[in-house]
Amino acid sequence: MSWAVEEWKEGLSHKVLQKIQELESQVGKLQKERQQRQFQLESLEAALQKQKQKVEDEKKEAATLKRENQSLMELCDSLEKAKQKVSHDLQVKESQVSILSGQLNSSKKDIERLEQEVKR
């Protein structure tokens, strides 16, 4: 079949045949170059898609970390409020202990005084 492809060239001058051969050679080189560039383009597109996926994954991770951070901040606020309540309750109880201690000391003195009176 290649003879049929070459049949149209019969009767052409040597100069024209040489020019056709040069053009065919150029076409072959251009086809190879086009294939290489197509491969490069496909490789770059694949790398771009990979980078886009990576960016999307990082955005999702950042959103997850942001939610987790917000949750932890809320937990810290809650714990700080609980700490303040416990601290306040402790102060109240220490105050009550101090009052009761004072009452106990006063009662002990009263008992000692009464015992002294009973002994007299």
Image (tube, rainbow, N blue to C red):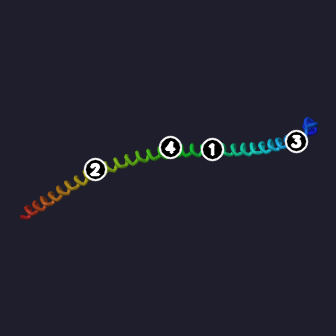
For label 4, the residue is 63
Label 4 near label 1: C-beta < 8 Å? no
For label 3, the residue is 15
For residue 97, side relative to residue 16 (left or right): left
Between circles 1 and 4, the one closer to the viewer is 1
Q: Position of residue 35 (x, y in %)?
A: 75, 43
Between circles 2 and 1, the one closer to the viewer is 1
Question: What residue is at 28 percent from the left and 50 percent from the top?
Answer: 88
Q: Amino acid at mark 4?
A: Ala
Binning the other alpha carbons within 10 Å of mark 2 as few (below 14), some (14 to 19) or many (20 upward) gives few
Q: Position of residue 19 (x, y in %)?
A: 84, 41
Between circles 2 and 4, the one closer to the viewer is 4
Q: Position of residue 67 (x, y in %)?
A: 47, 44
State the CA–CA distance, disc 2 to disc 4: 37 Å
Q: Which mark is residue 88?
A: 2
Q: Amino acid at mark 2?
A: His
Residue sitting at the far top: 8
For label 1, the residue is 48
Question: What residue is at 30 percent from the left and 52 percent from the top?
Answer: 87
Indicate the secondary structure of the residue bearing disc 3. helix
Indicate the secondary structure of the residue bearing disc 4. helix
State the CA–CA distance, disc 1 to disc 4: 22 Å
Q: Quadrant of the C terminus?
A: bottom left
